[in-house]
Image: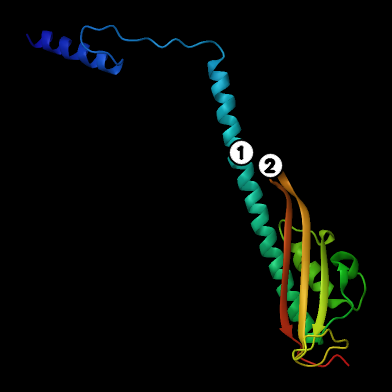
Amino acid sequence: MWKRCHNLLAALLRAERRGGHRGETAAVSIRRPGQSLVEFALGLGVLLLIILGGIDAVQILMTQYTVNQAVRASAHQAALIGGPDGSSGNVATSAQAPENSIAKTAQLVLDSGMTTNAEKATITVTCTNPQTGAVRNPCRRYDAVEVRIQYLDEVWAPIAMFDKVRADMRTTRAAEKDQQ
């Protein structure tokens, strides 16, 4: 008796697993050759999109962070020396001149970044009168010294709309001494 109940219960469970009821024949799925390959290709495309998108996102975020740090350090240097020192244009080229300490500061930060290169950045340093807002040269003490760094580069793994890394950062500090 026990053996009969066990066999009946096992048959019911097998039928349920196959989607049928007691007494019905279960449907058997027929797989065609190459079906697994197509499923794998579709899944691989989605997986690659997620991985490459993640790589692009990390590169964009790291670039934004590094350019922001370069702008802050350069603005601090500009405030210490009292305004612009001739640093303008390409960061790496401007840093070659011995008197351009602002561009050298930006180059040091950009070249030490994991995703950035100073060759791909431009720097602009201006000094403005706080009362009128007019550009002033030479800079006076407490004038606003603005440093702007623009960065443009290619992404490591271009997908869809992510083909360039752009960063445009600026910050303003007060000049701590006269530049006369």
> Are dots 2 and 1 in contact, CB under 8 Å?
yes
Q: Determine whether 137 is above or below 55 in the image.
A: below
* N-terminal label among 2 and 1: 1
Foreground pick, 7 / 18: 18
Quadrant into which the N terminus falls: top left
Circle 1 Cα neighbour tier, 10 Å, few/some/many (<14 / 14–19 / ≥20): few
Q: Residue beneath label 2, please?
A: 159
Q: How is the image coloured?
A: rainbow
The amino acid pointed to by label 1 is: Leu
- SS class, disc 1: helix
The amino acid pointed to by label 2 is: Ile
Q: Determine whether 115 is above or below 123 in the image.
A: above
Whether residue 41 can be seen here: yes
Q: Is residue 41 left or right of residue 176?
A: left
Query: Residue visible at 71% across and 57% down?
Result: 114
Q: Residue beneath label 1, please?
A: 49
- SS class, disc 2: strand
Q: Is residue 29 left or right of residue 93?
A: left
Q: CA distance from mark 2 to mark 1?
A: 8 Å
Quadrant into which the C terminus falls: bottom right
Q: Position of residue 121 (x, y in %)?
A: 81, 62
Q: Determine whether 163 is above or below 84 in the image.
A: above
Query: Residue visible at 57% across and 20% down?
Result: 38
Name the residue at the left extreme.
1
Circle 2 Cα neighbour tier, 10 Å, few/some/many (<14 / 14–19 / ≥20): few
Q: Position of residue 31 (x, y in %)?
A: 48, 12
Name the residue at the right extreme.
97
Q: Position of residue 59 (x, y in %)?
A: 67, 53
Please identify the quarter of the rendering in which residue 174 is found: bottom right
